Image (cartoon, helix red, strand yellow):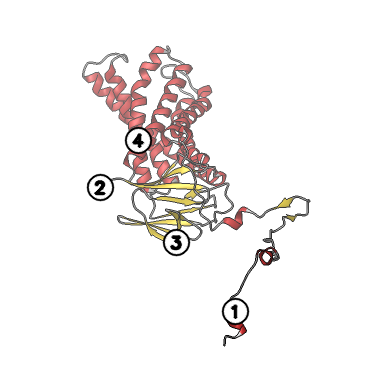
C-alpha cells in the first residue's frame, strides 16, 4: 500500500500565477549637499579595465618640432636682447658684440629646457629646469663662444692661405659652420644636464653639432641676400636656432634604444625615451612620465627598471596588459599597456 508521500506532485497554472517574485533592488541615486544627484565616481572603477581606442598623434608632440620651435624662439630672444648694443663698424664694439652669441646660446638652451616640460604639461618641472638653465647656459655660452671664435678664426686663416679673398666663397661659409658647431654642442650639453641623462646629452650634442653646423654654413649666404645689418643677423641666428633644435630632435629619435609611445590619452603621439635605469610614472609633476587629468593615477603609479637588455614594469596601481591587471612584467617589443586613460606601446630597437 502506497503512502500519501508517494502521490505525484501536481503544479497547476493557477499555482504559478500565485507566486510573488520580488523586484530586483535598484540603488537610488544619492543627493549631495548641493542637491545634485550622484551615481558614484570614477574612483569606484579604478580596478576595471576600460579599452581605449588608439588616437592620431599631433605634430606638436614630436621632439624635432617643439625643439626646433624652441631653438627658433630662443635665438630670436637672445638676438633681440643684444642687438641694441651691437655695432657693425670694423674695429668698433659695444656690449652687444660681446654678449650676443652667449645670450643666444643661453636663450636657446632655456628654450630646449622649457619645451619638453611644457609639452608634458609639467609647470613645476619647467620652472625648475628654467631656473637651472639660465645661469648654466650663460656660463657655457661664454665658454663655447670663445671656442667657436678660435675655430672660426683658424678656418678663415686656412681659407686665406689657400687664396680665398672674399666672403662669397663657400669655403668661408663652411669655416663658420665648423666654428658654430660648438654652439649646437652647448645646447646638447645643457639638454642632457637638465634631463639628468648622459646618453640624452650625448644624442643632444650630436644633433646640435649637425644642426648648428648646417645653420652656420648658411648664415653668410643669408646675410648677403638680406644685405647685412640687424635683419640679416635676426634671420641668420633664427636659422641656427631652428636647425639646432631640429637636429637634436631627429638624432635623439633615430638613436633611441627603448621608448614608450603614447597611443591614447592627452599625450597621444608623444614618445618617452627610456634613458634612466629607473623611469618613474605617475601623477606627480616631477615624475619622468607625468600623467595628468586622471584622478585614478597614483603619484607614484609605476616604474620601469632597466638592467642590461631587460626592461621590467613594476606597478603600484592598476596597470593592464592585454586586458589583464599586472603588477610585475618583463616588457617585450610591442607590448600595449594601459594606465587610466593612457595607453602606451613599448618599443625596442631591433638588435642584429
Front label number (2 vs 1): 1
Q: Residue at x 47, y 21 (%)?
A: 234
Spatial separation of the CA atoms under disc 1 and disc 3: 61 Å
Spatial separation of the CA atoms under disc 1 and disc 4: 95 Å
Q: Are marks 1 and 3 in contact (CB under 8 Å)?
A: no
Q: Residue furthest front?
A: 1
Spatial separation of the CA atoms under disc 2 and disc 1: 81 Å
- Decide if residue 117 is on the left or right side of residue 44: left
Mark yes or no: residue 149 visible: no
Quarter of the image with the N terminus in it: bottom right
Q: Nearer the viewer, residue 84 or 310?
A: 310
Instruction: Report which residue position mark 3 lands on.
Output: 327
Front label number (1 vs 4): 1
* Mark 3 burial class by Cα count in 10 Å: few <14, some 14-19, many 20+: some
Front label number (2 vs 3): 3
Going from N to C along the chain, the mark reached first, 2 or 4, is 4
Instruction: Report which residue position mark 2 lands on.
Output: 351
Where residue 350 appears, as percent x and y from the top left, is 28, 46
* Mark 1 burial class by Cα count in 10 Å: few <14, some 14-19, many 20+: few
Where residue 242 appears, as percent x and y from the top left, is 42, 28
SS assignment at label 3: loop
Instruction: Report which residue position mark 1 lands on.
Output: 7
Q: Nearer the viewer, residue 14 or 320?
A: 14
Where residue 40 sits, quadrant-wise, is bottom right
Where residue 310 sits, quadrant-wise, is bottom left
Instruction: Report which residue position mark 4 lands on.
Output: 207
Spatial separation of the CA atoms under disc 2 and disc 4: 23 Å
Amino acid at each position: 500500500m502506497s503512502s500519501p508521500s508517494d502521490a505525484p506532485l501536481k503544479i497547476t497554472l493557477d499555482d504559478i500565477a500565485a507566486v510573488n517574485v520580488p523586484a530586483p533592488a535598484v540603488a537610488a541615486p544619492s543627493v549631495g549637499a548641493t542637491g545634485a544627484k550622484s551615481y558614484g565616481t570614477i574612483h569606484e572603477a579604478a580596478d576595471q579595465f576600460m579599452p581605449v581606442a588608439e588616437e592620431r598623434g599631433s605634430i606638436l608632440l614630436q621632439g624635432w618640432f617643439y625643439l626646433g620651435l624652441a631653438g627658433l624662439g630662443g635665438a630670436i630672444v637672445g638676438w633681440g636682447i643684444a642687438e641694441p648694443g651691437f655695432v657693425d663698424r670694423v674695429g668698433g664694439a659695444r656690449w652687444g658684440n660681446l654678449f650676443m652669441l652667449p645670450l643666444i646660446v643661453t636663450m636657446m638652451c632655456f628654450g630646449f629646457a622649457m619645451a619638453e616640460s611644457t609639452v608634458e604639461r609639467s609647470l613645476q618641472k619647467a620652472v625648475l629646469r628654467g631656473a637651472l638653465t639660465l645661469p648654466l647656459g650663460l656660463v657655457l655660452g661664454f665658454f663655447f663662444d670663445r671656442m667657436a671664435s678660435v675655430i672660426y678664426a683658424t678656418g678663415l686663416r686656412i681659407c686665406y692661405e689657400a687664396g680665398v679673398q672674399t666672403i662669397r666663397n663657400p669655403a668661408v661659409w663652411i669655416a663658420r659652420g665648423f666654428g658654430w658647431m660648438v654652439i649646437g654642442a652647448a645646447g646638447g650639453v645643457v639638454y642632457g644636464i637638465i634631463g639628468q641623462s648622459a646618453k640624452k646629452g650625448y644624442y643632444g650634442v650630436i644633433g646640435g653639432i649637425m644642426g648648428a653646423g648646417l645653420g652656420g654654413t648658411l648664415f653668410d649666404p643669408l646675410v648677403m641676400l638680406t644685405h647685412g645689418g640687424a635683419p640679416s643677423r635676426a634671420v641668420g641666428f633664427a636659422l641656427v636656432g631652428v636647425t639646432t633644435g631640429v637636429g637634436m630632435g631627429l638624432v635623439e629619435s633615430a638613436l633611441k634604444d627603448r621608448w614608450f609611445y603614447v597611443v591614447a590619452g592627452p599625450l597621444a603621439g608623444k614618445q618617452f625615451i627610456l634613458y634612466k635605469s629607473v623611469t618613474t610614472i605617475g601623477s606627480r609633476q616631477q615624475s619622468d612620465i607625468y600623467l595628468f587629468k586622471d584622478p585614478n593615477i597614483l603619484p607614484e603609479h609605476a616604474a620601469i627598471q632597466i638592467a642590461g637588455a631587460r626592461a621590467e614594469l613594476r606597478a603600484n596601481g592598476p596597470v593592464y596588459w592585454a586586458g589583464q591587471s599586472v603588477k610585475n612584467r618583463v616588457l617585450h617589443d610591442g607590448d600595449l599597456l594601459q594606465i587610466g586613460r593612457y595607453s602606451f606601446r613599448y618599443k625596442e630597437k631591433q638588435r642584429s
